[in-house]
Amino acid sequence: MLSGRISVISIISVCIIASILFFYNLQSRDFWAPDEGDFAEIVTELKDNFVVPHLNGKPYGEKPPLFYYIVYASKISLPSLKDEASMRVPTALFAFFFIIFTFITIRKVFNKEVAIVTTFILMTTPLFYWQARYLQVDMIFSCFLAGSLFFFLWYYNTNRSYYLYLFFFSSGLAFMIKGPLSIVLIFPVVFMFLLHEKNFGILKPGAIFAGIIIFLLVVLPWYISIYFSEGLPYLYENVIRQNLTRFFDAWSHKRPFYYYLTTLPLDFFPWSLFLPAGIYIAFTKFKADHRLKFFLIWFLWMFFFLSISSGKISKYMLPLLPSVSIIVSYALLKKESRYNVVVFSFLSVLLLILSALLLFYKTDIYKEFLHERVLIGLSCLVVSITTFFLLRRKKLIYICLSFFLFMIVCYTIANASLYKKMNSYKSPKPVCEKIKTYIEDGTPWIYYGSIRGVYMYYSGKQAIHIDEHRKDELQNMTQKLDKFYILTRRRDMNEVEGSLRSVKTMFEEKVGNTLMVFSYYQKYIQESK
């Protein structure tokens, strides 16, 4: 009775905290470049063509459409909310379900203590928290991907076929978010796990056949529709170029193989400091504990595969965070660990230094953030002192609790006011509001550079897009149009001025660290000169 009551209290607490972290004040900031504005514009343009996603009026073949459909459904279902909230609700909602399903699965497969610690680690991980509040595909993709592996583990432990069907169904949904990448990340984990367990016999041929049918029923209808609508070029872009070509020779975000060794420690901080001990424990239990073996294989395979891919972004680590959280939970729950004492001692000193910097160092700069600096600085000081005293009493589990609370407090402060204040530096919306006043008479406008859908979204009008360094296309526009406006980055203005010989700058404004320039070209002025 008492155990059941504790479990209910635990899951209610998880639900309340996850709601605060993921949903509170979602509309506090505008859509930020690059990805949020692109996806907002794609979702907005779905009303014109529901089968083929479009960005700035052109077919967008980078990913399958399920993410856009989910966000579009949220947008039209929540008309009373601002788009900045209604379009972010799905990522927050899937993050919420992700956390709950993780808790339930780990509670069933391991025990209550591992479930609670794992869930709080995952929930307070910087990368997970940020992606839960950001309009990108990665959270929903990771939810379906992790869900499929959780379902397989349920199947392995119970031998009930419907869990295997759910595994294939969830895998198909992950495919419809990011394409073939889902297959490469999910199925090798299952294969290597069964290989080590020497238990391929658990896979019933009839259930596997039915599962494949379920997977195909999820995936094929859209791909067949898109073939008849757009033909092979679109499928080549969606399946081959965006996956196979990008894996071997990425055209953006090309980084060395060790890149994630530099990003994961920060994206998973402070829990990343306990990862070496967790990996050591997982390897020592590899043969004896099939559950921990499964999650270790999950982590190692995804980290390896994503590391050998030529294109890398830190958010790509999101799908492996559940496995890392479980591995680290074993390290944190180890009693009388000298390693944990050393790490918590280091964190105590680090937080003390950070509190001093936040409270006393250059408080005259960015004065609008002083309130948040003081609150977070005091929180650092309290946790640092608390950790010091708890270390003397060897109460390591209470130190874990204090750090969980510290992370939750910091995130809540950010949700409440920090992002709203940062918005004035990061938002492209003010630039777009100015652009609207110039183009409202119907004058065409050009976006010169890598496409940023946020400018079309907030200006309310599609642009003629010309990729950077395509000066010949820019020159050709002078033969087609007598006048137009052009938006580009300051660094590309030399190309613009060289191609158009002379343009009139209407205004310049910073968006984040990028200086944007809005200019005007008129043909007869050119000729008269």
Image: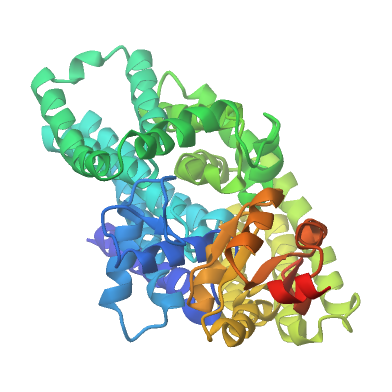
Out of 24 and 172, give the one closest to the viewer. Answer: 172
- Residue, far top: 198
Compared to 206, does 325 lie above or below? below
- Which of the colour schemes (rainbow, by chain, secondary structure, one colour) is used? rainbow
| Horizontal side, residue 150 vs residue 181: left or right | left
| Horizontal side, residue 112 vs residue 202: left or right | right
- Residue, far left: 206
Residue at 25% over, 59% down: 4
Compared to 317, does 194 lie above or below? above
Residue at 35% over, 58% down: 68
Residue at 71% over, 48% down: 469
Q: Quadrant of residue 375?
A: bottom right
Quadrant of the drawing holding the N terminus = bottom left
Out of 394 and 15, give the one closest to the viewer. Answer: 15
Residue 266 at x, y = what percent?
68, 50
Residue 440 at x, y = what percent?
53, 85
The answer to whether residue 281 of the structure is visible from this angle is no
Residue at 26% over, 76% down: 77
Q: Quadrant of residue 276?
A: top right
- Residue, far front: 528
Quadrant of the drawing holding the C terminus = bottom right
| Horizontal side, residue 9 vs residue 459: left or right | left
Out of 432 and 103, give the one closest to the viewer. Answer: 432
The answer to whether residue 448 of the structure is visible from this angle is yes
Compared to 73, does 499 lie above or below? above
Residue 518 at x, y = what percent?
71, 74
Number of numbered discs: 0
